[in-house]
Structure formats: C-alpha cells, structure tokens
Image (cartoon, grey):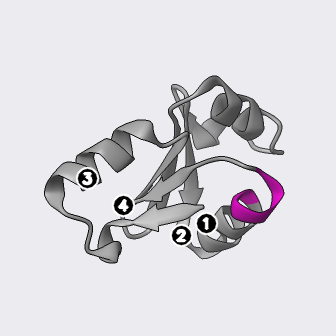
C-alpha cells in the first residue's frame, strides 16, 4: 500500500505513517530517492538491477522518468508499506 502526503492525513498521523513505512519515496523533481526504512525494503532494493552511481549510502536515486514505473512495480510485486512524499 502506498500512502502519499496528498492523502490529506492529519499532521500527527502523517509523521507516524512516515515513521512506520518500510520504504520512503521522496520526489525531488528530476530525481526520486527510494529510502529503505526496514531490512525487507533494503533487501528488495538490493535485488534490483542498478548501477553503483545510483546509490547514495543505502538510498537508491532514480531519474524521474522511470521512477513512477519502479514505484508501481514495488507496489504490486512486494508487500512493503510505501510512503510517497
């Protein structure tokens, strides 16, 4: 399940939702950051075919053009709790 900041979640619930998510996805415009917040999310991201330059620490950085498709894939192929900001 993906929750977004646009879901009009009250501030307290928004913070709790972000903290409890397995995977935090931040849209920075031209780049999206996929930030694992649990061991299962780290494992899922590690299994993706990526280049070394796409990683900043544990965070996977993706160009905005394929990012939405990757997010859709992660939503359908995994049981991760994903929070999109």
**Foreground tag (1 vs 4):** 4
The residue indicated by pointer 3 is: 13
Disc 2 + disc 4, Cβ < 8 Å: no
State which tag comes first along the sequence, 4 or 3: 3
Give the alpha-carbon distance from disc 4 to disc 3, as whole Å: 14 Å
The residue indicated by pointer 2 is: 64
**Quarter holding residue 1:** bottom right
Give the alpha-carbon distance from disc 3 to disc 2, as whole Å: 27 Å
Q: Decide whether residue 75 is among the magenta residues.
A: yes
Quadrant that contains the C terminus: bottom left
**Quarter holding residue 62:** bottom right
**Foreground tag (2 vs 4):** 4
Judge by depth and name the residue closer to the eye, 55 or 72.
Answer: 72
The residue indicated by pointer 1 is: 67
**Foreground tag (4 vs 3):** 3
Disc 1 + disc 2, Cβ < 8 Å: yes
The residue indicated by pointer 4 is: 85
> Which span of residues is magenta-colored?
74-78
State which tag comes first along the sequence, 3 or 1: 3
Judge by depth and name the residue closer to the eye, 39 or 63.
Answer: 39
């Amino acid at each position: 399940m993906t929750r977004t900041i646009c879901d009009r979640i009250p501030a307290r619930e928004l913070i709790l939702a972000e903290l409890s998510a397995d995977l935090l996805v931040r849209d920075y415009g031209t780049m999206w950051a996929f930030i694992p917040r649990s061991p299962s999310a780290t494992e899922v991201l590690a299994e993706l075919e990526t280049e070394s330059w796409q990683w900043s620490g544990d965070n996977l950085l993706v160009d905005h053009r394929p990012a939405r498709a990757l997010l859709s894939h992660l939503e359908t192929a995994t049981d991760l709790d994903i929070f999109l900001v």
